[in-house]
Amino acid sequence: MKIGVADTTFARVNMGAIAVDEIRRHASVQIERYTVPGVKDLPVACKKLIEERKCDLVMALGMPGGVEKDKLCAHEASQGLIMTQLMTNRHIIEVFVHEDEAKDGKELSWLAEQRTREHAVNAVRLLLYPKELEKMAGTGQRQGFEDAGPARR
Amino acid sequence: MKIGVADTTFARVNMGAIAVDEIRRHASVQIERYTVPGVKDLPVACKKLIEERKCDLVMALGMPGGVEKDKLCAHEASQGLIMTQLMTNRHIIEVFVHEDEAKDGKELSWLAEQRTREHAVNAVRLLLYPKELEKMAGTGQRQGFEDAGPARR
Amino acid sequence: MKIGVADTTFARVNMGAIAVDEIRRHASVQIERYTVPGVKDLPVACKKLIEERKCDLVMALGMPGGVEKDKLCAHEASQGLIMTQLMTNRHIIEVFVHEDEAKDGKELSWLAEQRTREHAVNAVRLLLYPKELEKMAGTGQRQGFEDAGPARR
Amino acid sequence: MKIGVADTTFARVNMGAIAVDEIRRHASVQIERYTVPGVKDLPVACKKLIEERKCDLVMALGMPGGVEKDKLCAHEASQGLIMTQLMTNRHIIEVFVHEDEAKDGKELSWLAEQRTREHAVNAVRLLLYPKELEKMAGTGQRQGFEDAGPARR
Amino acid sequence: MKIGVADTTFARVNMGAIAVDEIRRHASVQIERYTVPGVKDLPVACKKLIEERKCDLVMALGMPGGVEKDKLCAHEASQGLIMTQLMTNRHIIEVFVHEDEAKDGKELSWLAEQRTREHAVNAVRLLLYPKELEKMAGTGQRQGFEDAGPARR
């Protein structure tokens, strides 16, 4: 089994290194790293990780900026990541942390690390323990900030 | 005949279990379940249900959050689900319940269950009884809240 | 020659029946009918009409609701219908009537019927009499409400 | 060499006839004409011009209306035209004149003619004289209204 | 190794010439130039550079105008550029400078040149020195204006 980790030089936190660290805690898999300039370069990087470097699943890590133009870039990247999955029949776990989700650099660092680690666990589950996810269906899981939890009836 | 049921851990109601229950009331078909983290993971999950696990039709169940960023995720997921259908020539019944459609957790639970059950019936009709849908053409059907009904002349 | 007619149970007017009626007035062609729950189910229905039921052209009939979420559904459906055409090299005449285009149920019924009938004629022209459309190029045709007409110089 | 000219009955100016006239002034090429109802019908029309009628390049001419729904149609058409180019490896020169770009019918006629003629020249250059375009790189060319010109340093 | 440089006559700065100059400072590669009218013509131009002229990577250079319609064109072009990459498994470095990012022509010239040069270096790194990018992962790199730098903890 091989997991790809694609990240960017644009991000202000080394999300790729965090993902690699967390994956290693949960699974003995090979890891392929690929760093590109920005989020719009991620889709083809993920496709190359899957098709040329034979990854079974990829994490796509990015940190879009806070202005309108950045939001649009993130949207385009997300559309590309979904298309990549459809062209390859492989999961790509998108982990985007928007700069304006955090109130300062300290919270941004914390959020990027937390969300990356929680999604790294999701990646391992999808690849190796899919039944664990089924048990968590509809429980209001969130990555980074607190879980929403199940809706009270 | 085999129906796939794809849902998420992000949702705050176990829509997948509800779908399975309702499908079983109306048809003797095999059911394949697949749970992923969020709605953006649904398109490739549905494609894998169709291509790898041989489902004839899939229900894609999700509960997007209420803020702008969540709306965009749901939009991207919907585009991906349409593309998946075009790549496979199979129907995917999208059942999304937006958190802000309900005024509290109780209504959210009710709405998620109601819409899922009504769409499960649609799924069975599409697969087994397409002529029933033709009889209902243009009658203003809604899933969850009350039907709009035919336009008064 | 075979024309497909895809419509929805969501619509509040039986646009499919109107389309069938109007096509029959103008051409002796086979007609295949396909009713789905909503507009987002139309793209794959049209693709199946073209590829599995051998239609040469399809009319895709829908009536999106008036709120923002409905507009987005219609947009996603339209994108899917364009992609379907590109994947099949067949025309799909999209006939969408937005609920908020009309001031009440009566006008909505009128508009849905009028637009469907005028587009049914367009469908027949595209398939059988393409030169007729060329003669109408740049004349400001509209379907439903009054024609805009050519720009006055 | 063969150039396709696709236009609409929705437009209020016969942009197709203008394009044909201008192309003939600059090149001895075959021309194929194709008129469809509206801009959303243009992508597949262009694809058919390229694949079935063997055009080497196509001009796609349209005049979207001024309200929000029309803007969205134009956007969907543009996305489809780009996808068509990627599926065929042929250029499609999109010439859209938005009704609200002009203050009255007279200016609209002028603008539609001017922009169509200038883009017809671009079409000929792309097909026959690509080096001419390279010489104009970064010079702030516009089609219709006045050129922006190079940025002053 | 061959790098493609696609640019436009719409841009108000000769970004293509700047890219060629900067690439030559950092790598001995063949360069193919391709100039088109506007940003929406870039996706197929890049695809032709990759498939017909055998480029291993392409830079797509454009300068969208400042009004809403221009923003939408840029969005459509970006989506097309991502799709092109997915269809070819080659990177396309998008370098778009929005006219309204700069306060006057002088700053616009400076920004277009600076961003183009910095991305030309990224292009060379992606093609020849991918490990250099990995060392810069998460360091808040920007092209044109000042780097954001890593988030302070």
Image (cartoon, coloured by chain):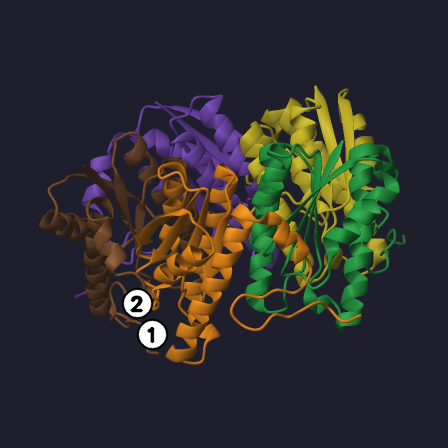
Chain colours: A yellow, B purple, C brown, D orange, E green
Residue A10 falls left or right of residue B32: right
**In this picture, is E67 found above or below C38?**
below
Comparing E59 with B49, the one in front is: E59
Residue type for callout 1: Ala
What kind of element bears circle 1?
loop
Residue B52, given in percent of the width and then of the height, sits at 49, 21
Q: Which mark is residue C140?
A: 2
Q: Quadrant of the N terminus of chain D?
A: top left
Comparing C126 with D30, the one in front is: D30
Chain ID of residue with mark 1:
C
Residue B150, given in percent of the width and then of the height, sits at 22, 58
Residue B92 falls left or right of residue C96: right
Residue D102, given in percent of the width and then of the height, sits at 45, 76
Disc 1: CA contacts within 10 A as few (<14), some (14-19) or many (>=20): many
Residue type for callout 2: Gly
Total labels: the figure holds 2
Chain ID of residue with mark 2:
C
Q: Residue C151 carries which label?
A: 1
Q: Write the residue at 42% across / 36% down.
A: B86
Q: Quadrant of the C terminus of chain D?
A: bottom right
**In this picture, is B130 found above or below A29?**
below
Residue A57 falls left or right of residue C71: right
Marks 2 and 1 close (CB-CB < 8 Å): yes
Disc 2: CA contacts within 10 A as few (<14), some (14-19) or many (>=20): many
Q: Earlier in the sequence, mark 2 or mark 1?
A: 2
